[in-house]
Structures are given as C-alpha cells and as structure tokens.
Amino acid sequence: MRMSSTILPRGRIIRNLRWWIGALLFISTVINYIDRQTLSVLAPFLKAEHHWTNADYASILLAFRLAYTIMQSVSGRMLDRLGTRRGLTLTVAFYSAVAGLTSLAQGLTGFRVFRFLLGAGEAANWPGATKAVSEWFPAKERAWAVALFDSGSSIGGAVAPFLVLFLYRHFGTWRPAFLVTAGLGALWLVAFQLLYRRPEEHPCISPEELELIQRDRAPEPATGDSVGWGELLRFRQTWGIILGRALLDPYWYLIAEWFPLYLLSKGFKLEQSVLGVWAPFVAADLGNFFGAALSSYWISRGWPVGKARRRVLILFGPCMLVLIGTIFVTNYILLLGLFSFATFAYAACATMFLSLPADVFQSRVVASVSGLSGTAAGLVTLLTTYLIGQTTDRFSFEPVIIAASVVPCIATALLVWLVRANRKPDSQSIMLKF
C-alpha cells in the first residue's frame, strides 16, 4: 500500500480516533457555513453603506454560487490527486485567506471578486469530507459520519447570525467580522495538521480500530493510477449519484432561500415567520441522523450496504409528497409541521446520497464522483433559482411546491434504479462490493 512520505513516530493511542476525525469534518463544515453566511448577515448594513440595490446584492451571491458550482468537480479531482490531507489543507487555507481579505473590499466589484474566490475555495468541503469518510469509516458507520459533517451546515447557519452581529455591534463596523470568521479556519487548520493522516499512516490509531476500518475495504492498486472523469462517467452508478443529487439538492435551497418568502405569501406575519424558519432546519438535522441510524441498523443486521441505503431512499423519497398539502393549509403550525416533515425526509435521503460515493467507489476516486454530483446539483440549483423567481412573480408558489414534492420521487427512483452492484468484471478496478 502506498504510504505517506512523512510518517510520525508512534504516539499515544487515541481511542475511537475515527470519531475525532469525524468531529474535525463537522467543525470544518460549521466554519464553512459561517464564512459564507457572514455576508448574508451583514447584507442590510452593507447595502445601506454602499447604496446597493437588490440586483447588486444578487450579483454578489451569484458570483459565489457560480464559482462553487464549477469548482465542485475541479476540487474533487484535485483532492483525489493530492490526497485528503494536502487537498483540504490547501483549500481551507485558501478560502480562510479570502474570507479575511474580504475585510479590505471597497465596493461592489471587490465583493463580487472575493465572493467568487470564496466559492472556489469552499467547493472542496463536501468532496473532501466524503473522501475522508471513505478512508476512515467502515460501511456500517459511514452514514453516521456523513450525517455528522453534513449537520454542520445547519449549525453553522444558525451560529453565524449571533456571532457576526455580536462582532458588528462590538466593533461598530463590519470589517472585523470577516477577519474573525477567517481566523476560525486558521485555528481549524492547526488541529487538522496535528490530527489528520490516513488510518494506515496514523501513529495514534489502535490496531483494533485499524482492523475495523480495513475489514470491508477493497484493496486498491499500489500504483495509485489516476482515474479520469471519462472513465467514471462510463458507470451507471456515477450517473445515478449525479442525477439523484442534482434533482434532490435544489429542495434544500428552496428551504434556505425561499421559505420565509413562502410563509409571507401565505399571509403570515414576518415576526411569526422568523421563529418558524428554524423548524425545517431542526428537522433537517434530525433527518440526517435518523437516516444514518436506520441504514446502519439494517447493515448491522446483515443487510448489504446498497440494500440498506436504497431502502431509506424508497421509504423517505415519496414522503416529500406531503408538501402538496401545504397548498391547501392555512394553519401556521400545521404548515410548519408539513414542511418540517418533508425536510426531515429530504435530510434522511440526503445522508444516503452523500454516502453513496464512498459506498460504491474506492477512496481514490470518491472526491471526483462527489465533486461531479456537486457540480450537477449546483447547475440545476442555478436554473431552479431563476425559475422559482419567474414562476412566483408571474403566478404563485403553488407550481414550485408541487415540483418540490414530485421531483424528489423521480430522484430517488433514479438512485434506486441506477446505483446497484455492477457485475462486469472490469468494474472491480475502482468499484466496491455494494
């Protein structure tokens, strides 16, 4: 097996080291979301200071999302070439520096440039975390690890308003907020450099834990030959992961970006809606861990990994049809309940499709597959964001809600149909037994 050029002398054994790694990935996602939400929290002050229109502000958001979408695939490929440790070190250092430099921005063009660069750097988080999970966790625990790091997006989104507004009020200006949030990434890098290695290279892993991690891992070629996008796209499993995530992911942005406006369109007061906006995010965290727990339970009962993952998708994908009921509901609590349940079901599915690259492919190509699916999801999200704006301006939210109910059923059907064990002999070069 190929080893790192730098092997530390064996140190004190850290029990359950893989979960310390999982905690690092969770904290990275929290910081990632704090960095990206800093601008959103400061938007009212920045708009007033720079006299921006809504269109001006939207152009800054678009710059971030465009870079983030493109760089998902590029960063995934880079991570598979450089390795998780080097790849995440470079990307987190880059986007932390960009976040700090945003404090020097002077106008609209400056913010567009810095947000574009921030999106380019932050795109590596999900492919990198998924790759780390594939290296450090056995099959029955991967969904738990994915749920853990993915839940950092909700936590980071919840923490950002309190932290950023405190900094703004304390310093009386917005610039230090970008410096402080950038500093969080620098602190994380120190911890990451001290703790992260591949399991086979780690001086603090116990023999029992290493054996547990390696037990169901297929041997990888010693040469570590690069696998290109063209080869990956020959597999129907790759297309299943790409199409499934591309059709499922936009639901999250519907909740994150449009849900308050939807509540207002239903006639609820803004003061009441602010508290309600939290409900789907709490449901998402619960759904992440419930989906992980359910699939892990079935795997512990002897089910193949693929069967356990597909069963969660079959169970919860159709549950999102409850959203159609919100069209006819006028009771605020019932409306929140339906949206929260749908988001719970979405998050249970999300944990599965974020786990699938690590379940189906060897770790040397996991980041590439995850990055391709992230780019596809980003492109579809760009399109749906435009369509939602056009549809709600010309008609109402009702067509959007119907689509958000039906499309996840199509996505889960594609995942279940396409992401199955491949019986072709040549597939064994990069695919795991699924």
Image: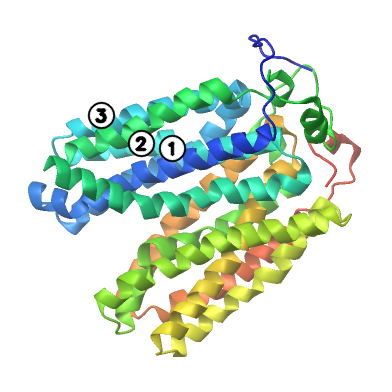
Q: Nearer the viewer, residue 104 or 396?
A: 104
Gap in Å between the C-alphas at discs 2 and 1? 6 Å
Q: Secondary structure at mark 1?
A: helix
Assess whether mark 1 and mark 2 are in contact (beta carbons under 8 angstroms): yes
Amino acid, disc 2:
Leu
Q: Give the amino acid type for the residue marked by disc 3 in the picture.
A: Leu
Look at the picture and state if 262 lies above or below 225.
Answer: below
- What residue is drawn where x is 52% and y is 52%? 151
- SS at mark 3 in the image: helix
Name the amino acid type tagged 1: Glu
Q: Earlier in the sequence, mark 3 or mark 1?
A: 3
Task: Estimate the spatial distance between the alpha carbons at disc 3 and disc 1, rounded to whole Å.
Answer: 15 Å
Q: Is residue 191 above or below residue 289?
A: above
**Secondary structure of residue under mark 2:** helix
In which quadrant of the rendered view does residue 310 lie? Answer: bottom right
Residue at 11% across, 43% down? 172
- Quadrant location of the N terminus? top right
Q: CA distance from mark 2 to mark 3?
A: 10 Å
Question: How would you rate the neighbour count of disc 2 (Cα within 10 Å): few for under 14, some for 14-19, many for 20 or more?
Answer: many
Q: Going from the N terminus, do you reach mark 2 or mark 3 first?
A: 3
**Left/right of residue 357 with respect to residue 29 in the rendered view:** right
Vertical relation: 95 (above or below) 52 = above
Q: Is residue 90 visible?
A: no
Tag 3 residue: 101
Task: Look at mark 1 in the image and give the residue it sits on.
Answer: 122
Residue 7 visible in the snapshot: yes
